[in-house]
Amino acid sequence: MRRFALTFAAALLAAQPLFAAPITYSAADRAELDRVSAYLNSIRTMKGGFVQIDPNGDVDQGNFDISKPGRMRFEYKPPAPTLIVSDGKTVAVANTQLKTIDSYPLDQTPLDLILGDSIDLAGSHEIVGVARQQDSFIVKARSRGGRTQGNITLTFSEPELELRQWTVIDNQGLSTTVALRNVQTGIDIPASLFVLPDKAALKPKPND
């Protein structure tokens, strides 16, 4: 059974606002977070493909489009029936097979980590830590105010900074990873891609 709705949508989209104070960083960590923030703020549009691996090892693929602030579209290829669209105010998760749509206010999710107009990771209440690997810089975040541990991990390539993937851990401790592919930035993206789906207009994809 594919677990997308339980992991990415439930853990990332259905998050509650955070009220904890930001953590204190070393000078080196703050400098790195400021560098990542500047990179994310430099991106106004982004598109590409993605590969998702769920806790069972099932692999789904699709295409994504982002137009800041606040707008995104993740469209999964069949047989996955999922479509996620944010119009800048609302995030809608549609199942084209069941013809259902779940909606969340954008400002009640941590999606500003990617979609915000002015991102400040070092001052964000969601960030709980950073880590370094040989060829990557990792930002750990949380999606719920009651959490003390991170359940969202953003991975950036090094030394040429680029968002490569994120991993979401659900309440059962199961992880789903979304890796980005063939990313393009600074390109024109039609505004029509970010219109929220209409339940009446949902059509099953081939092989749904």
Image (tube, rainbow, N blue to C red):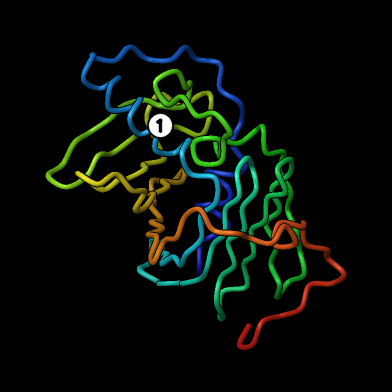
Residue 163: x, y in percent? 36, 48
User: Relative to residue 74, is residue 35 drawn left or right?
Assistant: left
Residue sitting at x 62%, y 67%: 82
User: Relative to residue 74, is residue 32 drawn left or right?
Assistant: left
Residue 53: x, y in percent? 38, 64
Query: Is residue 53 something that shows in the picture?
Result: no
Query: Is residue 152 something that shows in the picture?
Result: yes
Whether residue 115 is situated above or below residue 31 in the rendered picture: below
Q: Nearer the viewer, residue 202 or 72?
A: 72
Residue sitting at x 39%, y 66%: 182
Q: Which of 96 and 51 is in front in this view?
A: 51
Looking at the rendered image, the quarter that the C terminus falls into is: bottom right
Image-quadrant location for residue 158: top left
Helix, strand or loop status at disc 1? helix
Q: Which of 38 and 32 is in front in this view?
A: 38
Q: What residue type is labelled 1?
A: Ala
Residue 30: x, y in percent? 30, 19
Q: Given the current orientation, which residue lies at the most extreme bottom position?
A: 207
Residue sitting at x 28%, y 30%: 130
Tell me the residue that label 1 is attached to: 38
